[in-house]
């Protein structure tokens, strides 16, 4: 049973929010490399927009990283990229175009060592659905908002046995940065 209060989630029978958050922050931080998806749909910069749209639709995804033949991350081609293509084509009467012209070359990214709270804060601050995980400019994985939700749900399930205190996730959703949150929980 989930009860939503403002930006809080209540999970009966789990650890209280403070203990749960201290686990996330202090015991052993959960890192991107532990939760990232490694098998990804990627797009070649040689594709035209229509080919890329076809791939996104067939794979039922809202966007995909564009990666060069040598593995270099070039950006993200997404539903927003498609909308930009439609607008540009309507006004400029463009012929078939390479996806690079409509790829976001500077999306928010993280490294394999980025901790879970920083990942959550990045999702809040950047309003993005996915975070490419880069190492030395190369794509090594991806984390979606749903991946984070899965980790939180698994942690809550694993902690329910024998505990009657509620778990509140409002700290994750409240917009505080992870450093301020660490100080708050240390008190």
Image (spheres, grey):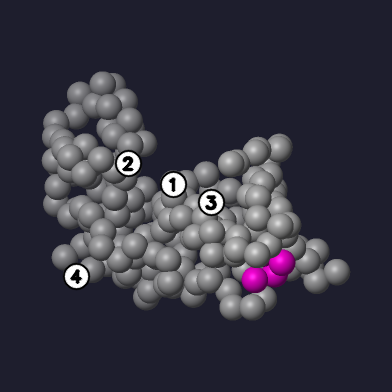
Q: Quadrant of the N terminus?
A: top right
Q: CA distance from mark 2 to mark 4?
A: 24 Å
Residue at point 58% right, 74% down? 29
Query: In the drawing, what numbered circle is on residue 129?
Result: 1
The first of marks 3 and 1 along the sequence is: 3
Q: Are the residues flagged by discs 1 and 2 in contact, CB closer than 8 Å?
A: yes
Disc ID at residue 48: none
Viewer-side label of 4, 1: 1
Give 174 or 136, whichever is nearer the viewer. Answer: 174
Residue 123's mark?
A: 3
Marks 4 and 3, how far apart at CA? 28 Å
Local SS, label 2:
loop
Q: Position of residue 131 (x, y in %)?
A: 43, 56
Residue annotated with mark 2: 62
**Residue under label 4:** 70
Looking at the picture, how far across and down is residue 117, in whole percent? 60, 62
Up-down relation of residue 58 to residue 23 (above or below):
above
Q: Is residue 124 above or below residue 163?
A: above
User: Which residue is more in the foreground, 174 or 68?
Assistant: 174
Q: Which residues, given as a range, are shown in magenta? A: 19-23
Picture quadrant of residue 54: top left
Q: Determine if the magenta segment contains residue 22.
A: yes
Q: Earlier in the sequence, mark 4 or mark 3?
A: 4
Residue found 54% across the figure and 59% down from its top: 157
Measured Cα–Cα span from mark 4 to mark 1: 26 Å
- Secondary structure, mark 1, is loop
> Which of pointers 2 and 3 lies earlier in the amino acid sequence?
2
| Secondary structure beneath label 3 | helix
Percent of width and height locating residue 185: 78, 66
User: Crowding near pointer 3: few (<14 within 10 Å), some, many (20+)?
Assistant: some
What predominant SS class does the magenta segment belong to?
helix
User: Pointer 4 and pointer 1: residues touching (CB < 8 Å)?
Assistant: no
């Amino acid at each position: 049973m989930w009860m939503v209060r403002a930006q809080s989630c209540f999970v009966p029978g789990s650890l209280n929010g403070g203990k749960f958050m201290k686990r996330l922050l202090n015991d052993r931080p959960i890192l991107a490399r532990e939760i990232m998806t490694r098998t990804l749909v990627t797009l070649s910069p040689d594709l035209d927009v229509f080919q890329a749209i076809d791939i996104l639709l067939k794979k039922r995804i809202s966007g995909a990283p564009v990666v060069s033949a040598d593995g270099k991350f070039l950006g993200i081609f997404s539903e927003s990229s498609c909308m930009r293509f439609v607008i540009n084509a309507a006004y400029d009467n463009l012929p078939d175009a390479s996806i690079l012209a409509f790829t976001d070359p500077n999306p928010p990214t993280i490294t394999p060592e980025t901790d879970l709270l920083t990942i959550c804060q990045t999702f809040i601050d950047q309003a993005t659905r996915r975070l490419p995980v880069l190492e030395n400019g190369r794509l090594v994985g991806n984390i979606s908002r749903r991946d984070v939700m899965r980790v939180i749900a698994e942690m809550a399930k694993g902690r329910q046995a024998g505990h009657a205190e509620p778990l509140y996730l409002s700290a994750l959703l409240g917009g505080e940065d992870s450093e301020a949150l660490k100080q708050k929980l240390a008190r």
